[in-house]
């Protein structure tokens, strides 16, 4: 008798694949938009209007770190793509 895991069905695998592709597309779209389509994009407006941890993020907006933060956000997204292989 085999032990059948309820999470090892074709429906589960299909849903995992769908959500991984959806997340990959989301990160790809955001990265391409911020890097190539709108090269003047900056995180300054987002950081200036944060409600949570505004004491930390607010002062960063006017600092000399903003170009570094923008660079890390734009180019750091390229490493966020989920793989299609499940990680167990």
Image: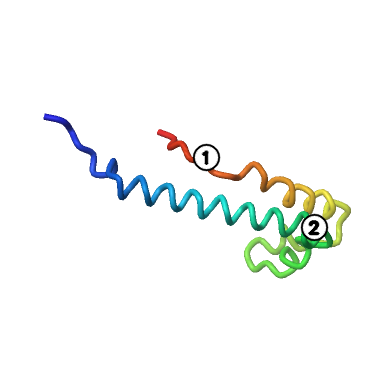
Instruction: Tell me the element at label 2.
Output: helix
**What residue is drawn where x is 43% and y is 37%?**
86
Instruction: Tell me the element at label 1.
Output: loop
Nearer to us in this view, 18 or 59: 18
**What residue is drawn where x is 54% and y is 43%?**
82
Q: Quadrant of residue 45?
A: bottom right
- Position of 83 with respect to 78 (left or right) is left
* Nearer to us: label 2 or label 1: 1
Nearer to us in this view, 81 or 88: 81
Q: Earlier in the sequence, mark 2 or mark 1?
A: 2
> What residue does disc 2 label?
60
Q: Quadrant of residue 88?
A: top left
Tell me if residue 81 comes above or below residue 48 in the rendering.
above
Nearer to us in this view, 71 or 61: 71
Give the image location of residue 73, x and y in percent.
Answer: 72, 51
Tell me if residue 60 comes above or below residue 79 in the rendering.
below
Give the image location of residue 59, x and y in percent.
Answer: 80, 60
Whole-Å distance between the Cαs marked 2 and 1?
33 Å
> What residue does disc 1 label?
83
Label 1 neighbour load within 10 Å: few <14, some 14-19, many 20+: few
Give the image location of residue 85, x and y in percent.
Answer: 46, 36
């Amino acid at each position: 008798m085999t032990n059948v895991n309820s999470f090892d069905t074709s429906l589960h695998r299909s849903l995992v694949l769908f959500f991984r592709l959806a997340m990959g597309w989301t990160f790809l779209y955001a990265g391409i938009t911020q890097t190539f389509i709108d090269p003047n994009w900056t995180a300054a407006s987002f950081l200036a209007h944060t409600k949570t941890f505004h004491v930390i993020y607010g002062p960063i907006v006017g600092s000399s770190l903003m170009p570094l933060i923008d660079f890390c956000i734009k180019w750091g997204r390229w490493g966020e793509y989920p793989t299609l292989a499940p990680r167990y």
